[in-house]
Amino acid sequence: MKPLFLVGYMGCGKSTIGRKLARALHLPFVDTDNCVEEREGATVFDIFHYEGEERFREIERAVLEEVARAQTSIISTGGGLPAWGDNMARMNELGRTIYLKRSAENIASRLSPYGRQKRPRLRGLNDEELVVFMREDMARRDPFYSQATQVVACEGKSDDEIIREIIEFKEIVER
């Protein structure tokens, strides 16, 4: 079985759903942001701040290649990873991609103050600015996310419902 990549905007639930999906499928779970931080010995925020987004995206791509080749797993990607270079096409070559789709308003309501602070591009935005920023940024990224093998509309669904939808689609595809 090839890896399953979870893509979508920051805060859409990739890590939470990914961990639960990995448990349900008895597979390892990998979070590319955590891998970047372990590899570099610095937070995503610090890498963005001190080395810039370009350097962060280069590191992220290298991590993508490493985790995709290691073993079959559920891989939660950073929100910008699919929209950088040919990363989305590469993930589609290496495995299956699942777009966890939510609205900017839904994601904003889900983000804790800590969740905002740890994301470099959201730091310092008030509630109104956050939704406006997210809508614009999501519009730029959606063409990449929409290339996913499977698009899951997450709003109004529990984590268990989302996981069941992913597993049912997986079983249909693999038949």
Image (tube, grey):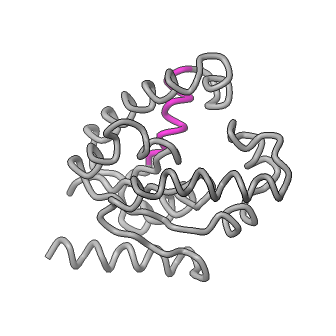
- Is 64 or 23 nearer to us in this picture? 64
Span colored in magenta: 30-40
Classified by dominant secondary structure, the portion drawn in magenta counts as: helix
Q: Position of residue 1 (x, y in %)?
A: 20, 57
Q: Position of residue 129 (x, y in %)?
A: 79, 52
**Point 67% across, 30% down: residue:** 45
Q: Quadrant of residue 7?
A: bottom left
Residue that protrudes farthest toward the top in the picture: 50
Query: Left or right: where does residue 80 sit relative to residue 3?
Result: right
**Point 50% across, 81% down: residue:** 161
- Is 16 or 96 nearer to us in this picture? 96
Query: Left or right: where does residue 111 sit relative to residue 173?
Result: right
- Is 96 or 39 nearer to us in this picture? 96
Can you say whether 128 is above or below 56 in the image? below
Whether the magenta-drawn stretch holds residue 111 is answered as no
**Point 47% across, 58% down: residue:** 142
Can you say whether 150 is above or below 121 in the image? below
Point out the image quarter for the C terminus.
bottom left
**Point 41% across, 57% down: residue:** 143
Query: Left or right: where does residue 52 sit relative to residue 25?
Result: right
